[in-house]
Amino acid sequence: MSLAKRYVLRLFISLKYVTANVVDRQSGRIVVTASSVEKPLRDGLECGRTCNAKAAAAVGEVLAMRLKVDGLAREPIHAAAAKEVEKKGFKNRAKVWAILNALRDHGVNLRIDDDGDHRPHV
């Protein structure tokens, strides 16, 4: 297996919750995770019955901090934005990009693959 994309971002979005995992493809294990299901994060959000882009951004921030603590923030984390939006549906596009932008804004070496968005990514 090629280790070109060793760490990949996987998102799980439901009507109530958002979960973001970084998976090590070499071992097949989740190395870092963050979710709006977690009590400290959930208590700080005002999701009500639905979880919005603000909650998704908070999940991205927590994931970024955990990546920094584990020393993985400098490792390239690959995310297929177009694939994630396609899988989650167009309604969840804002949540997907909120997570990706939060990771990028907090210094994670995020590599956006096939995103279809032609804005310059830092």
Image (cartoon, rainbow, N blue to C red):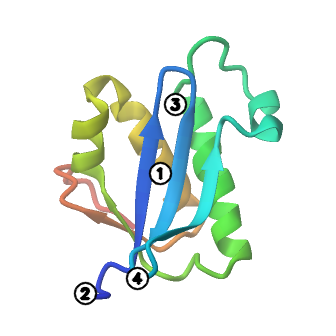
In this rendering, would 2 be left or right of 59?
left
Q: Earlier in the sequence, mark 1 or mark 2?
A: 2
Kindly check if marks 1 and 4 are in contact, taking CB atoms under 8 A apart as contact.
no
Q: Quadrant of residue 79?
A: bottom left
Kindly check if marks 2 and 3 are in contact, taking CB atoms under 8 A apart as contact.
no
Residue 26's tag is: 4
The residue that mark 3 highlights is: 53
Q: Position of residue 102 (x, y in %)?
A: 55, 51
Q: Residue at x 21, y 38 (%)?
A: 86
Q: Quadrant of residue 120?
A: bottom left
In this rendering, would 61 be left or right of 38?
left
Give the CA distance from mark 3 to mark 4. 31 Å
Give the CA distance from mark 1 to mark 4. 26 Å
Residue type, label 4: Gln
Residue type, label 3: Ala
In this rendering, would 33 be left or right of 112?
right
Q: Earlier in the sequence, mark 3 or mark 4?
A: 4
The residue that mark 1 highlights is: 101
Residue type, label 2: Met
Residue 50's tag is: none
Kindly check if marks 2 and 4 are in contact, taking CB atoms under 8 A apart as contact.
yes
Observer-side mark, 1 or 4, equals 4
The residue that mark 2 highlights is: 1
Q: Earlier in the sequence, mark 1 or mark 4?
A: 4
Badge 4 crowding class, 10 Å Cα cut-off, few under 14, some 14 to 19, many 20 or more, is few
Give the CA distance from mark 2 to mark 3. 35 Å
Observer-side mark, 2 or 3, equals 2
In this rendering, would 99 be left or right of 47?
left
